[in-house]
Image (tube, grey):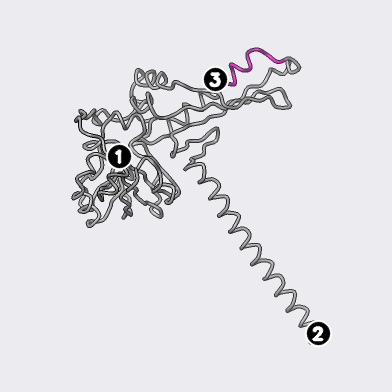
Amino acid sequence: MSKSISKKIDLKIALSLLFFLLFLLFFQHSLLFAGEALCSNGHIENFEHGSINWSTGSITAKGKAAPLKENKNKLSSSIPGAANADAMKNLIDILKNIKIARQSVEEFVASNDDIMAQFENTISDVSAIKQYYTSDGALEIEVKTSMYGSFLQFILPHTIAQIPEIHSIKVSDEVLKQRGKYTGLVLDTRGLKFKPLLYPIIKNEYGEEIYSELYINREYAVQRGICQYSCDMEKAVADKRVGANPLVLKGLRIGDESNSIIINKSDAEKIEKIIERHSFFKECRVIIVID
């Protein structure tokens, strides 16, 4: 083989490697950009027919209905009702997939027919946010509701009780920050593969509960959720939910039953010394940052 042919082959190999590396770089950047775009709207868990936004508590579901073949050229008045019924069915299915603590909503409501009926009655304030006809005459509709309110009131364990309010002078977050007081908790669980659920528990390394039903006021838990989830640390720290001076901690590992997050000994001791934790825990001023 001549030297000129050998050089041409080497050049082709080098160019091929260069293009491959450029493709990998572009692909990685595209994934990063897509991840940032997805996270900008909150932490979203997608399902076949809808999604849950764990940052806002909103749940969306899609439904579809098409005219019968023999009436394909006529828009039946029953189609909107059928599409809405399909969307509601899918919405209920999504809600059933939510994990409460150790069990899912579906496992909880399946234990009793009366509970199932009550569960379906809690799904209120559902609104249609999109509606359009496809080229084949089918109607697609998207509905939206919130997990906050009646749904959480029904689903959350009754052991999360109402804590009597103690009348005291309300101090602003900015004043608390100036006094060196903490106004909330941001717990970083990135890398631990923690999955969102309605009732997460924070524990120390000995299994003792740091944040649980003992410290939560049911009124706040129902109105805003026991915690908020975020996939952006910077946004979490700046979120008004945790106030002007949140305590930021790193999760150590996930508990054995996957419904708890373990923090290390020194962090647990630090929290125990913070008197104001009783106030911000009671108001569920907690954000968990996840992947």
Q: Distance between the residues labelled 3 and 1?
A: 46 Å
Q: How far apart are marks 2 and 1 (CA)?
A: 78 Å
The residue nearer to you, when weighing 60 against 3, is 60
Question: How far across and how far down the image is residue 3, in percent?
Answer: 79, 87
What residue would you read off at disc 2? Answer: 4
Among numbered discs 3 and 2, the one appearing first in the sequence: 2
Write down the quadrant of residue 216 in the picture: top left
- What's the residue type where badge 3 is placed? Ala
**Which residue is located at x 31 percent, y 42 percent?**
173
- What's the residue type where badge 2 is placed? Ser
For the N terminus, give its image quadrant.
Answer: bottom right
Label 3 crowding class (10 Å Cα cut-off): few <14, some 14-19, many 20+? some
Over which residues does the magenta segment extend?
Answer: 75-86
Furthest-bottom residue in view?
A: 3
Among numbered discs 2 and 1, the one appearing first in the sequence: 2
What residue would you read off at disc 1? Answer: 172
Q: In this view, does 206 lie above or below 54?
A: below
- Callout 2: SS: helix
What residue would you read off at disc 3? Answer: 85
Label 1 crowding class (10 Å Cα cut-off): few <14, some 14-19, many 20+? few
Is residue 196 visible in this depiction of the protein? no
Camera-side mark, 2 or 1: 1
Chief secondary structure of the magenta portion: helix
Among numbered discs 3 and 1, the one appearing first in the sequence: 3
- Callout 1: SS: loop
Question: How far across and how far down the image is residue 109, in percent?
Answer: 36, 25
- Whether residue 42 is in magenta: the answer is no
**Which residue is located at x 75 percent, y 74 percent?**
12
Question: How far across and how far down the image is residue 181, in percent?
Answer: 25, 48
- What's the residue type where badge 1 is placed? Ser
